[in-house]
Image (cartoon, helix red, strand yellow):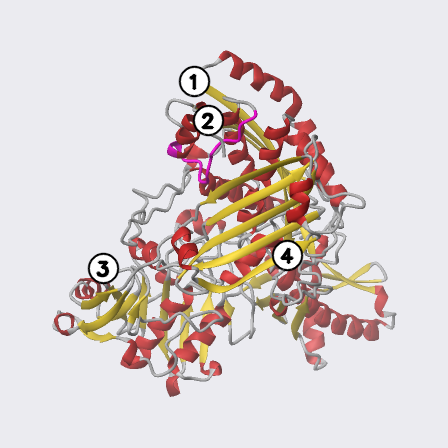
Amino acid sequence: MAQTTARDTEAGKAVPHDSALKHVTGRAPYTDDLPEPEGLLHLAPCWARDCAHGRILDVDTSAAQAMPGVITVLTAASIPGENDCAPAMGDDPILADGIIHFHGQVVAVVVAVSRDAARRAALQVSVEVEPLPAILTVDDALAADDTVLPDYAFQRGEPEAAVTEAPCQLSTRLHIGGQDHFYLEGQVAMAVPWEDGDLHVFSSTQHPSEVQHTVAKVLDRLEASVSVEVRRMGGAFGGKESQANQWAALAALAAHVTGRPCKMRLDRDDDMIMTGKRHDFRVNMRAGFDDTGRIQATTMDFASRCGYSADLSLGINDRALFHADNAYYYPQALLRSRRMRTNTVSNTAFRGFGGPQGMLAAERLMDAIAITVGRDPLDVRLDNLYGPDRETTPYGMVVEEHAVLRDIMESLAQDCQYRTRRERIAAFNADNSFLKKGLALTPVKFGISFTLTHLNQAGALVHLYKDGSVHLNHGGTEMGQGLYQKIAQIAADEMGVSLARVHVTSARTDKVPNTSATAASSSTDLNGMAVVNACKEIRERLTAFAARQYDVAPAGVHMHADWVYVDGDKVMSVADLARAAYTARISLSAAGYYATPEINWDRETAQGRPFFYFAHGAACSEVTIDTLTGEHRVDQVDVLHDVGRSINPALDIGQIEGGFVQGMGWLTTEELCWDDRGRLRTHAPSTYKIPTASDVPKAFSVRLYASNGNPKPTVFRSKAVGEPPLMLPISVYCAINDAVSSLRPGLIPRLDAPATPEAVLIAVQEIRRGNGA
């Protein structure tokens, strides 16, 4: 059943997104919609248009400088500080200096009085390059043994020997494609000079503090002299966690050089060419299991295309290993990761942060085992789930809610009539030569926390005004996910006021400093608790003041829905109490802080607890494929997902639906293609196919699991919902695989991801020839 709430609170209500009306009417101002200051200049990027790797011999800007409206052309020599926008490793220049490492790397930027003038002039910049050998694919990098980061692994037992000794064995290989973020709002930033060389930067970023740090580093300024602000983004999905740094830094550099406000907004094609994607992986798997399909040991080797620099590849590839078990217990396991360097754009964060790739490998393994032993894949999955005495992951963390995970899967299987539909599908496939159906029910177990432990902290600034209204600021950013609405509901309950009296303002580094990125599905957990702590401090001051005024114990004073109750009787409004407290010189402002407890991961020893808790869910998908064309149709999807005690069920269901469709795009239609010269050929919606409204399954049921709440002390006992739903459509990929495998039972299809019509047709042709994976 869908989750309901009986709480007489703002939290728990299915209220609309705070900007919903502005979104649908086009009145929501994004960075490019802000009023443009007088004298604003515009930037356009310049790059060597036919080079993936080469030595820069000359950059001739004279023709561009002579173009109408051009103010200047900036190169690496224009940078007063460090030429670096990397989030950690110091290996990512904002402007290429000496070497071009990938096709699309920016060599210079034109600064002009209009965007059109800047773009026209950018085409006139001549870059002379001496070509160097280019490594373009994972296989190329493996052959060259070239990595951006050291290899890493988790091991339990002696799995390589155990696989060989098991009653049954298999080995299989899977290529997992990348994905472009395709946010509706592209990369954009505007830098406005203030007095004494200070800068105010408006940036479409998930990480204002990192943009602040990068701008200060590039300009050789104190971070305190740079403030960064972001009210909303038109989507981000991880693509604006580290990747926004470069464009904000270039706008700030131009503002520093010219003394005028400067804006940089990338064209869609340039954006896709110049910014990182989801990592693509090559995975080799071996498993040993008994004749029922229960795993005894497994080895998984992950090799990912990281691009030319590390960016966030350390954490992303680590998380792929953390989730290579998904929901399954591996008695003995060796999970290895190689982070390959290529002369392509540096890949970066994307919703799930490596977790989806690890989970897809796990589910591919379950299907392969089920095909090998001739059992229903759901039964093999259930038999391999974490459970009593089988609850420790390969990295040593205990899966505490394994009973919830099993209940979700079994409840969903019953509610969506999995067993009955399996029989119907078998009959359909027997009666049809060219159309084949497939069915799959797959789980999600996703760890919630940043695996870099120090990032699990947040701050908030809350003011209560004399009219009883609340102004709050926190370190999270709004990218359409509804974070601001949830935070407002939390604050309303904690301050005892109605939701209409809460005002959430732009994320700003000069209000809440040293923030973590809005990422890792942790933003409500972190920022919500910081807001709770700030509100609690103000409320405790007011409660103590009212208790003195009415000569009662503080426990007898309550604030709720704009009113103050003393021993159960309504005595005044919150506004009246605020005015009285102000007159009595009691502070009505507080800074809140929160750090996630219990987590203590030590990467060097691979010991500790990387996640505060796991989010769980499951999805059942039914598909039909055309074996003559490779095309497929998703006939029905049923989802059951655990969000704990939902702060806003409408937003949570929206996140699940949106995440599912985005993940379905990654696994079925969104194919990134580079040519043999390192040029991205799918850099526009004409060639890169994201899901559209017509791709949403007509029968699409999403329900929230009837949870008693997160057993961990999260804000209002809720659970994160940002990233986990993206892994639910792995069930679509597995259903397509199931349909292909029906052509020759016992043979594992050669089906890579994304399962495009071409990939499905190849898998069909190969399995008919008797060639398996």
Q: Is residue 646 visible?
A: no
| Sequence-first disc among 1 and 4 | 4
- How many other residues sit within 10 Å of disc 2, few (<14), some (14-19) or many (≥20)? many
The residue that mark 3 highlights is: 49
Position above or below: 557 against 171? below
Q: Where does the N terminus fall, quadrant-wise?
A: top right
Would you call the spot at circle 3 few (<14 residues within 10 Å), some (14-19), or many (20 or more)?
few
Residue 767 has which mark?
A: 2
Q: Secondary structure at mark 4?
A: strand
Q: Which mark is residue 207?
A: none
Classed neighbour count for the residue bearing mark 1: other residues with Cα under 10 Å, few (<14), some (14–19), many (≥20):
few
- Distance from disc 3 to disc 2, alpha carbons, whole Å, reads 41 Å
Q: Is residue 341 magenta?
A: no
Residue corresponding to mark 4: 154
Q: Position of residue 554 (x, y in %)?
A: 84, 69
Span highlighted in magenta in the image: 746-758
Q: Nearer the viewer, residue 460 or 604?
A: 604
Amino acid under label 4?
A: Phe
